Image (spheres, helix red, strand yellow):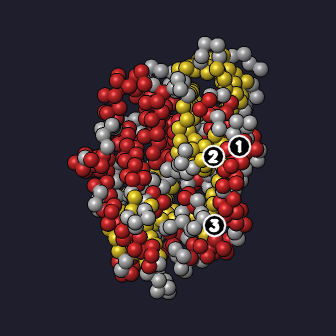
Amino acid sequence: MSNRQTETDVILIGAGIMSATLGTLLKELVPNWKITVFEKLASPGEESSNEWNNAGTGHAALCELNYTSEKPDGSIDISKAISVNEQFQVSMQFWSYLVKSNLIRNPQDFIMPLPHMSMVQGKEDVAFLKRRFETMSKNPLFQGMEFSDDPKKLMEWIPLIMKDRTSDEPIAATKMDSGTDVNFGALTRMLFEHLKSKNVGIHYKHSVDDIKRNSEGAWELKIRNLSSGSVERHTAKFVFIGGGGGSLPLLQKSGIPEGKHIGGFPISGLFMVCNNPEVVAQHHAKVYGKAKVGAPPMSVPHLDTRFIDNQKSLLFGPFAGFSPKFLKTGSMFDLLGSVKPNNVLTMLAAGAKNLSLTKYLIQQVMLSKEKRMEELREFIPNAKSEDWDMLVAGQRVQVIKDTEAGGKGTLQFGTEVVTASDGSIAALLGASPGASTAVSVMLEVIEKCFPQHAKAWEPKIREMIPSYGAPLMKNPGLIREIHTSTARTLGLNRGLHSANVM
């Protein structure tokens, strides 16, 4: 046992996209603060932020149908889509600032232009998609959206999906050419390289065993070096817990009242990845369908072109599943260990409310490869089993809490920040849209935890994010300006027609 004690201004737990973003923002705002990062694994961005763990779709609400709901009168509520898109625009502005300032280079290594599409089948869903298109295309954020239910036009847009389609069921799609594919694993690694050059202490293979307040009010962390087995104590005035699914147990250890009555429900995922370059070359878009009745929002089927290591890939999924682990590299006892006296009733209520979801997840786990191929064939009618391999995606831990609207034990689908009332500690919980909204979410952490610096930091934040504090929707001129400048800086005008780039 080492008695070594180290003091620092800020400790970031977990080396994923959230810690990378918060660390980079803080280094720009207060370069002299001492920041230390602890990560359990051997390198950054290996859990939820990894490109093979489904963190890379560039969620901008251009194609995800679960962000636009139908109201009882048949009109379409696009408020969630507006909110997610505005948050994505904030991320784009920050990444542009980093590229312009030479803090990171080669944006094509983490972001590529790619059309985003929604596709539906059946008379009712086609009518829904048309109403959604009419509502969204009037909004300046979604200008340029196209709609078609003409099979010839769809054959141009999505040849792989339309080829050999024998069903005469109506089919329709919307398309936004301004979509992107984001490799959050690559971006996370770039940001940590940058932080290392700014003298941020980054410690891999270090696990946080405990976290508690000391008599001076600072946070004391008990940290185990997984290589040597030695234990050190580190103290900080501010701690951010950005450990993906591993955040909840650490939030519970902190003992803050805001962390009580919160539980977590782990959901795992599987993807199918195409191993045939000829098939991969025939598809150039992210195409989102509609979730099946009873399925959770994160299991909306989609056929995604992805750019990983400058190679074009094709993924289909996700197939949801259940594992009691909170992280891909976690323990089978994670879920059981997270049940505490203060959240046991919340957890039990959630279990009772979500029996159909649990049943659905178990059914998904039991699916054979051939059953999964049948689901893929709803997208690609002539898909061959030998062209596709299974890939285990990352773990997502959905937040369970008591809410006014949903009552006790309500399962939350989204990204949540929990902060102590004095702003000395913050934890990030939840899942999608997650990485795509990282900059907005980390600005929220900064606003909540450092209100005393708000005035002094605002000019620098505006330099990094020109739209900061201004709702974009009410300012079409600013939207156009941001779209033009971010596309130019991030190189998104390149290759818009390079459908067969390999």
CB-based contact (under 8 Å), mark 2 and mark 1 = yes
The residue beneath circle 1 is 345
- Give the numbered dot on residue 174: none
Residue type pointed to by label 1: Leu
Q: CA distance from mark 2 to mark 1?
A: 8 Å
**In this picture, is 388 found above or below 297?**
below
SS for dot 2: strand
Q: Quadrant of the C terminus?
A: bottom left
Disc 3 versus disc 2: nearer the observer: 2
Q: Residue at x 70, y 66 (%)?
A: 363
CB-based contact (under 8 Å), mark 1 and mark 3 = no
- Is residue 433 visible to us here? yes
Displayed quadrant of residue 362: bottom right
Displayed quadrant of residue 257: top right
The residue beneath circle 3 is 389
Residue 45 in the image: state x and y as whole percent: 57, 43
Marks 2 and 1, the one that precedes in the sequence:
1
Q: CA distance from mark 3 to mark 2?
A: 40 Å
Q: Residue at x 38, y 40 (%)?
A: 94
Residue type pointed to by label 3: Asp
- Is residue 85 visible to us here? no
Residue type pointed to by label 2: Lys
